[in-house]
Amino acid sequence: MTTSSATLAAAMAPIALVCNVATAGHLSMPIIYGDNWSESPYSLLSGNQLSRGMGKNVAQRLHFSAEGIEDVPVTRVALEACSGTVFVGAITFSQGGHETVQTAHSERRVEYMFAEASSFKHFTVYFDASVCLSKIALFDQDGAPYDLAAPRVAQGTIHASSTLAPADSYDAWHLFDSREDAAWATSGSGIGASVTFDFDQPQNLSGLMIWNCYQRSKKHCEANARPKKISLTADGASAGTITLEDSDVAKIYSLPQPVHVKQLVLSIEEVYPGSYYKDTVISELRFVDGDNLFMMGVENDQNHANARRLHQLWSAGLGGFLNEVLGTFDDSLRWELFLSGDRLQLGHRDAHMTRDLTFVADMEISKVKEHSLVARAYGVLYVHDGENRIVEETLTIRRVAPNGIEVRNETRRSLPFRSVRFWQHM
């Protein structure tokens, strides 16, 4: 496997499927998310371009998922840059755990052909250098392009009766942020907790597509509680109960009867206990209207949360390091760092320059000073040829020079370093 620095960067029985994602070349994309784009990645499927992010060496990511309905064969992917721009540097194509890197030399169009068609669950493209993207196409086993469609967006508000702190990390709007590694989590046992969806306009609703559990990893899924039985209330009247499968795969569940609803309340009645945490977690949710999916617009919630995090990072003097891949001066250490608004990624290479571990962590910032901050970093440690682990460390991140950052590991539970200094590529 080849890697690049961009990788741093349902009373109802369980239900049958009510729609298909791939019929006659039509491919519905319930999950699309990206890092460091100026617009929502869904806009790319509406004929709009995705503008480049900020930073000299910004790394960008675009992730697609059709998991949970049926597998889709993909043989080729084609990318086109915006008019007047080109692709430069490494572009990493990742599918089914396999990664391949292509280097673009001032090209406006880039294509990648898979050796053979494989089932489409997750497909990700990483860009080492900042890009502006105008088109992306995925091709089936006959070489024909799929008609890619995004879920419809319904405007409204979301309110949860219980949210694990900090709210920016676990608020209910994460149900529609298109990130399977972010989620709504209750504070303590989720039994009795509810989330209310108030639509600006009444909606037709025949089912729910639910990514049950914390889908950051299988270990996170098992460690946290998952809803087992939920009840639904539509405009004050009971809309039935649904029993959810204990699965880390997205499932579609039908309502006993379709409803026309302006306010929907989802309440947790029973849970599957977590092996470690009591908190109950749902990663993503989509509403089902016949054969179509739709979601709630959460751009304002996302923007407000991002603004708060960015303010903390800039206050600590770290804003100038955002969205850039930093390395160490000492080649013997072989560490790399990627710092974004809410996420920290650390990678290490062994003596043969093979990636032997990667730590992908969300950050909960607890203290901000003029030139440093203290954060709880929690996520997954990916170990080459080893078992992935849930990791939680307390890190102090401070500016050490005009172009340097020091990361100190205050707890040293799982990460094998005490202190590492990183430097911007000048």
Image (cartoon, rainbow, N blue to C red):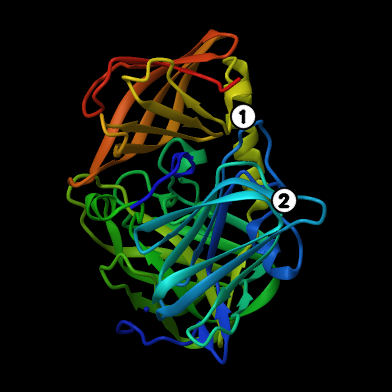
Q: In the orientation shown, which residue stands out farthest toward the right?
A: 84
Element under label 1? Answer: helix
The amino acid beneath tag 1 is Leu
The amino acid beneath tag 2 is Val
Q: In the orientation shown, which residue stands out farthest toward the front?
A: 105
The answer to whether 103 appears left or right of 384 in the picture is right
Q: Position of residue 75 (x, y in %)?
A: 48, 76
Q: Position of residue 61 (x, y in %)?
A: 55, 50
Q: Could you tell me if residue 319 is visible in this image? A: yes
Residue 112 lies, with reference to residue 15, above or below; the image says: above
The quadrant of the image that shows the C terminus is top right
Element under label 2? Answer: loop
- Name the N-terminal-most of marks 1 and 2: 2
In contact (CB < 8 Å): disc 1 and disc 2:
no
**Which mark, by number, is residue 114?**
none
Q: Position of residue 87 (x, y in %)?
A: 66, 50
Quick one: 268 or 66, which is closer to the camera? Answer: 66
Per the image, the residue denoted by label 2 is 86
What whole-number distance in Å separates the C-alpha atoms at marks 1 and 2? Answer: 29 Å
Residue 274 lies, with reference to residue 68, above or below; the image says: above
Kindly report which numbered mark, 1 or 2, lies closer to the viewer in this rendering.
Answer: 2
What residue is at 56 percent from the left and 80 percent from the top? 27
Q: Could you tell me if residue 155 is visible in this image? A: no
Q: How many marks?
A: 2
The answer to whether 9 appears left or right of 79 in the picture is left
Per the image, the residue denoted by label 1 is 310
